[in-house]
Amino acid sequence: MFVMSNFLEAVAGVLNTILSIYSWAIIIRVLITWVSPDPFNPIVQFLSRVCDPFLDIFRRAIPPLGPFDLSPMIAILVLQAAQHFLVKTLIDVSIRMR
């Protein structure tokens, strides 16, 4: 059982890293939009392709309030909640399997 326990702990670590990187990608995407970037820049296009599908879910649920788009903040809060819940749950399960 220790092999499965170690595997779950490794999955928790990878998931934690992926969710952190995705949160930072959203933050960078928001910061870049403040300086009106070149839409043909490959970095801007990559961040748009990666972040916008997830942000669109929240944009449909919460429309912009004038010039303020709250969807990135809500998306990051959801990612943080999922990160804490899923990673902690996987680690707890792996500890109980030992």
Image (cartoon, rainbow, N blue to C red):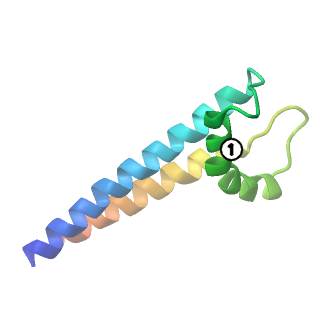
Could you tell me residue 71's position as x and y percent?
A: 72, 46
User: Does 90 sit left or right of 95 as displayed?
Assistant: right
Which residue sits at x=61%, y=35%?
A: 43
Which residue sits at x=60%, y=40%?
A: 26
Which residue sits at x=35%, y=59%?
A: 87
Residue furthest out toward the top = 35
Residue furthest out toward the bottom = 1
Which residue in the structure is indicated by mark 1?
48
Question: Is residue 57 something one can see in this rendering?
Answer: yes
Q: Residue 88 is drawn in which quadrant? A: bottom left
User: Where is 11 relative to 84, above or below?
Assistant: below
Question: Is residue 98 something one can see in this rendering?
Answer: no
Q: Secondary structure at mark 1?
A: helix
**Residue closer to the observer: 51 or 91:** 51
Q: Residue 29 is drawn in which quadrant? A: top right
**Residue closer to the observer: 5 or 42:** 42
User: Where is 57 relative to 39, above or below?
Assistant: below
Could you tell me residue 37's position as x and y percent?
A: 74, 25
User: Does 44 sit left or right of 79 as displayed?
Assistant: right
Q: Amino acid at mark 1?
A: Ser
Q: Residue 1 is drawn in which quadrant? A: bottom left
Which residue sits at x=81%, y=52%?
A: 62
Could you tell me residue 28's position as x and y percent?
A: 59, 32
**Residue closer to the observer: 42 or 11:** 42
Could you tell me residue 38's position as x and y percent?
A: 75, 27
**Count of numbered labels shown in the rendering:** 1
User: Does 64 sit left or right of 80 as displayed?
Assistant: right
